[in-house]
Amino acid sequence: MIISFLLYLLLPSLFSTLSISQPLRGRLIDCGATFDTDFNGLKWLSDKDFITTGLPRNLSIQYQDATLSTVRTFPYENNLHKKFCYVVPVYRTGKYLVRTTYFYGGVNENVNPPVFDQIVDGTFWVMVNTTNDYLRNLTSYYEGVFMATGKSMSVCLAANQYTDSDPFMSALELVLLDNSLYNSTDFTSFGLSLISRNSFGYNGSIIRYPDDVFDRYWEPYGDINSTASRIRDVEVSGFWNIPPLKVFQTQLSVNQPEQLEILWPSEPIPNSTYYIALYFADDPGSSRVFSVYINGVQYYNDLNMTSDGVSIIAKQWPLAGLTNITLSPAAGSRIGPLINAGEIFGILPLGGRTLTRDVIALEKLKESFVYPPVDWTGDPCLPRGYSWTGVSCSEGPRIRVTNLNLTGMGLSGSISPSIADLTGLSEIYLANNNLEGSIPDFSTLKLLEILHLEDNQITGEIPSSLGNMEKLRGVFLQNNNLTGQVPGNLIGKPGLDFRYSPGNPSLSIPQS
Ligand SMILES: *[C@@H]1O[C@H](CO)[C@@H](O)[C@H](O)[C@H]1NC(C)=O
Ligand SMILES: *[C@@H]1O[C@H](CO)[C@@H](O)[C@H](O)[C@H]1NC(C)=O
Ligand SMILES: *[C@@H]1O[C@H](CO)[C@@H](O)[C@H](O)[C@H]1NC(C)=O
Ligand SMILES: *[C@@H]1O[C@H](CO)[C@@H](O)[C@H](O)[C@H]1NC(C)=O
Ligand SMILES: *[C@@H]1O[C@H](CO)[C@@H](O)[C@H](O)[C@H]1NC(C)=O
Ligand SMILES: *[C@@H]1O[C@H](CO)[C@@H](O)[C@H](O)[C@H]1NC(C)=O
Ligand SMILES: *[C@@H]1O[C@H](CO)[C@@H](O)[C@H](O)[C@H]1NC(C)=O
Ligand SMILES: *[C@@H]1O[C@H](CO)[C@@H](O)[C@H](O)[C@H]1NC(C)=O
Ligand SMILES: *[C@@H]1O[C@H](CO)[C@@H](O)[C@H](O)[C@H]1NC(C)=O
Ligand SMILES: *[C@@H]1O[C@H](CO)[C@@H](O)[C@H](O)[C@H]1NC(C)=O
Ligand SMILES: *[C@@H]1O[C@H](CO)[C@@H](O)[C@H](O)[C@H]1NC(C)=O
């Protein structure tokens, strides 16, 4: 049983607003580069403003594509499932094409490139394995479409159990897409992860910017028998998904009114649901009618294709393994079918995100620490298993921070009062660091049970509000530099394990 959603769109569009030469809106980041470069008419930025960890490295060979000559690498040792994130400013609710590019170039000593995980915001996107491409001296890229849920988007790498040398990245691109692109997808719940995007019957180099105004890559997909180059003047700007005009200049077709079959995408794909868009345009004055089947299942019946151009889109189509597209001419046709281009994306359920209030509070806490843990970037709780060092979180739809354990992390600096906004916290372990400053007011943390601040250099008085916190079972303040009187409501409070000595020589105990 196949459940699918079909859309049929014929858009002659006389009211186009997009100019073909519009500049890209977004950020092209050249990982590891120390300065900005112009390459192929595009401006590439050094990555230094978008990341605080990792090492910029130069490959020993300089490549023609300037963005491939440098990479940023991240230490894999002792960092299993720790995220290293690029954080890029975006327009909230903007729809972005995100592309990561990898060219290993032997930057680590290993012969083979490392395998590692790639994460976008709170979502596990894909495992990056560039081994095969690198063996053939090819660049690998991963491309997806994601909506920005905040003012920044994070794209992260993390070591997994297969990682055997430092994860690296060569380039990261975020390009703002037009609202109409891929708009049948609900980007609040799903992302799209590119499987294949091809210009059929085309054998040149990848079609991209400026032919594609969003710099999507359209790879050649040839077939010697049916390649043909035509001059077609399709008005693409009103086309759904705005494919580049250039893809309509070649096609796969058959001359006789018979079936056209293509194996596409060329590699087997996992059992999942996919978004598929196919693009067609006939020669001026010509039209043809045919039906489209995917693996023998009807996808569109009697498509009448004219020189205006048409795209057909499947929002969610189940596929597994090798895929076979068949174009079958309608009875009585005098010419065979043709196809110009296609895109297929995997539909990726989003992992969600940590409650914004908690994220903001943790960011402020991070700012108050000197040398916070290196992986404190990206989403604090998600994806599951990739939370920030020392941060534990709740399950369920509302993701809250429940536990903070930074015991003995060599932290200095102070504890930001914003910690009091983490109202889901039940345990705080900050013992055995070099924290200074005073104890913040924790009274908003109604769920707090355990507070460990011992073995630091905390100064000031002990807030008496601690004595009114109902759930509190343990308060540990030994070996600090606290002053003033110990609040009477803490001493001998039933059910509370309260310790303030040894240490704290200047603390005075109230007379009972
Ligand atoms: C890489 O090369 C550039 C230019 O040749 C140089 O400015 C930069 O310092 C080098 N970076 C590293 C990490 O060696
Ligand atoms: C990575 O790809 C190579 C080549 O296809 C394969 O041999 C290897 O098993 C893959 N690694 C993982 C962890 O999937
Ligand atoms: C690998 O590809 C690069 C860039 O296309 C090229 O400069 C280089 O000569 C190639 N190396 C080999 C061994 O094919
Ligand atoms: C998607 O974009 C097209 C082209 O602009 C528009 O006609 C259509 O109504 C949009 N669909 C949705 C669901 O927004
Ligand atoms: C592409 O195909 C055309 C037409 O068949 C042919 O003339 C040309 O040499 C091919 N180019 C490449 C790079 O294969
Ligand atoms: C290409 O043409 C040859 C000879 O006509 C034929 O044997 C072959 O099956 C064709 N290939 C495809 C993919 O249509
Ligand atoms: C794909 O997965 C679904 C549900 O898990 C299953 O019913 C179906 O048989 C699978 N299809 C293939 C071709 O493996
Ligand atoms: C493609 O699908 C059609 C219809 O199911 C089938 O007849 C044909 O053998 C398939 N071709 C390939 C190469 O799988
Ligand atoms: C297909 O559309 C063209 C242009 O609208 C029209 O002239 C032609 O009659 C249509 N063909 C069929 C079979 O409907
Ligand atoms: C806190 O973290 C330290 C160091 O990682 C660990 O030894 C300790 O068991 C953790 N404590 C709790 C309560 O999770
Ligand atoms: C506590 O403060 C005093 C005076 O401000 C200082 O001399 C001492 O070194 C501090 N002790 C610790 C453990 O920081």
Image (cartoon, rainbow, N blue to C red):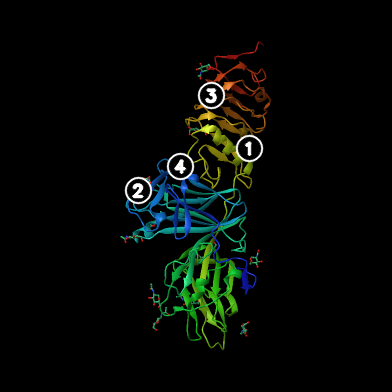
Circle 3 residue: 454
Quote the CA–CA distance across marks 1 and 2: 42 Å
Identify the residue shown where x is 50% and y is 64%. 210
Mark 2 C-beta to ligand 1 under 8 Å: no
Quote the CA–CA distance across marks 1 and 3: 22 Å
Circle 2 residue: 108
Q: Could you tell me the amino acid type at mark 2?
A: Asn
Query: Residue 424, labelled with which disc?
Result: 1
Q: Could you tell me the amino acid type at mark 3?
A: Glu
User: Are circles 3 and 2 on residues that touch, CB within 8 Å?
Assistant: no
First in residue order: circle 1 vs circle 3: 1
Q: Residues within 10 Å of mark 2 (few under 14, many from 20)?
A: some
Q: Residues within 10 Å of mark 3 (few under 14, many from 20)?
A: many
Q: Residues within 10 Å of mark 4 (few under 14, many from 20)?
A: some
The image quadrant where one finds the N terminus is bottom right
Front label number (4 vs 1): 4
Could one spot residue 1 in this view of the protein? no
Q: Secondary structure at mark 1?
A: loop
Please provide percent x and percent y for residue 275: 56, 65
- The correct choice, above or below, for 501 with respect to 354 in the image is above
Quote the CA–CA distance across marks 3 and 2: 42 Å
Indicate left or right for 252 with 149 as reference: left
Identify the residue shown where x is 52% and y is 24%. 456
Please provide percent x and percent y for residue 214: 53, 62
